């Protein structure tokens, strides 16, 4: 009997009460619309909602009703028993301008959406057909633009796609940002913000965040650094530098030069006397003369 009663109640809910006028949607509240098409989008949602009940809300049907308006990114629907339905519309946020039209970060073309403030320009490659970008490179650039943090959105000037650096963001009154591909966009923006806030990076011409864990600032004024040989290699040759010549050293032989003398062979009395380090080495004694016999002795004087 209990099972039979449950089956009867379930059947009554499924085939009668679920779609009964007792729980029909009568009050529809739509929020979140800012586009100039807001009246038409609201009318389409209200019309579709009035065919439903608070026990049977078909969100897919609501999304189909506004399929002609790409500005809508998502719908949050909440039923309030017995007759109220709240619909919150989440719109696409324009991230860049492509061919004179605003586009969202996911590549959706936002025709008719009012633009507030300045948006970065992305060079158009091909034609804008349909409601989404079709060029992969332009789509990557739009994705990078869509991930920009709010404090930097107004400073984005242009986004280019280059062969070596990939996606490059040009900042107004700031350096270029090298993003490479469009992966890990959030981590790359966080790394870029951290470098931009570092006083030591002031004056950099570019910031490379292709490896967000190892961002680098380039184009800073170079400091004079002594060359250092890399580990395991031969000593790095230093650039030749003309040093002042020590008057006591012969630059040709790098040997100590003899002190200057006067005409009679004596050292001059004026000037600084030579230091012990610059004095000439003592001369070796001349070899003793040998006799005619070759014995190595000295011949006695005659007589």
Image (cartoon, rainbow, N blue to C red):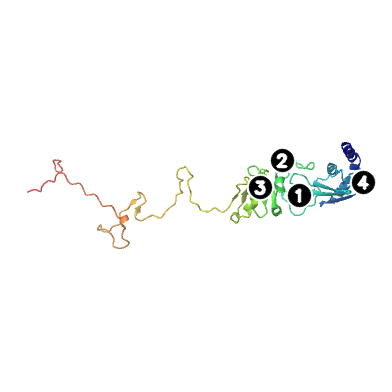
Nearer the N terminus, badge 4 or badge 2?
4
Q: Residue 70: image x %, image y %?
A: 81, 45
Disc 2 from disc 1: Cα separation? 18 Å
User: Regarding mark 3 in the picture, which secondary structure is present there?
Assistant: helix
Badge 2 crowding class, 10 Å Cα cut-off, few under 14, some 14 to 19, many 20 or more, is few
Q: Nearer the viewer, mark 2 or mark 1?
A: 1
Which comes before the other along the chain, label 3 or label 2? 2
Query: Which residue is identified by label 2?
Result: 136
Residue matched to label 4: 22
Residue nearest the observer in this picture, 6 or 126: 6
Mark 3 = which residue?
A: 187
Residue underneath mark 1: 94
The local crowd at label 4, few if under 14, some if 14 to 19, many if 20 or more residues have their Cα within 10 Å, is few
Residue 252 in the image: x percent, y percent? 36, 49
Distance of label 1 from label 4 (alpha carbons): 42 Å
Q: Residue at x 63, y 52 (%)?
A: 194
């Amino acid at each position: 009997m209990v099972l039979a009663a449950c089956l009867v109640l379930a059947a009554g809910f499924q085939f009668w009460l679920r779609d009964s006028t007792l729980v029909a949607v009568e009050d529809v509240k739509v929020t979140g619309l800012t586009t100039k098409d807001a009246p038409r989008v609201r009318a389409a949602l209200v019309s579709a909602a009035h065919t439903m009940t608070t026990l049977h809300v078909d969100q897919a049907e609501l999304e189909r009703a506004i399929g002609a308006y790409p500005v809508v990114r998502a719908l949050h629907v909440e039923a309030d028993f017995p007759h109220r339905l709240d619909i919150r519309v989440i719109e696409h946020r324009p991230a860049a301008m492509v061919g004179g039209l605003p586009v969202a970060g996911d590549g959706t073309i936002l025709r008719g959406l009012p633009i507030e403030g300045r948006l970065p320009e992305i060079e158009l490659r091909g034609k804008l057909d349909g409601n989404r970008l079709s060029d992969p490179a332009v789509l990557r650039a739009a994705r990078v633009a869509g991930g920009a943090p709010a404090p930097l959105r107004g400073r984005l000037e242009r986004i280019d796609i280059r062969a070596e650096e990939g996606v490059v963001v040009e900042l107004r009154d700031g350096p270029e940002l090298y993003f490479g591909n469009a992966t890990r966009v959030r981590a790359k923006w966080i790394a870029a913000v951290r470098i931009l806030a570092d006083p030591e990076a002031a004056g950099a011409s570019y910031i490379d965040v292709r490896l967000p864990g190892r961002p680098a600032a380039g184009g800073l004024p170079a400091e004079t650094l002594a060359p250092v040989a890399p580990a395991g290699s031969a000593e790095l040759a230093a650039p030749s530098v003309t040093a002042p010549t020590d008057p006591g050293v012969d630059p040709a032989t790098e040997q100590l030069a003899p002190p200057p003398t006067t005409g009679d062979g004596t050292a001059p009395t004026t000037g600084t006397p030579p230091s012990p380090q610059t004095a000439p080495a003592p001369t070796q004694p001349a070899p003793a003369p040998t006799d005619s016999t070759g014995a190595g002795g000295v011949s006695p004087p005659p007589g």
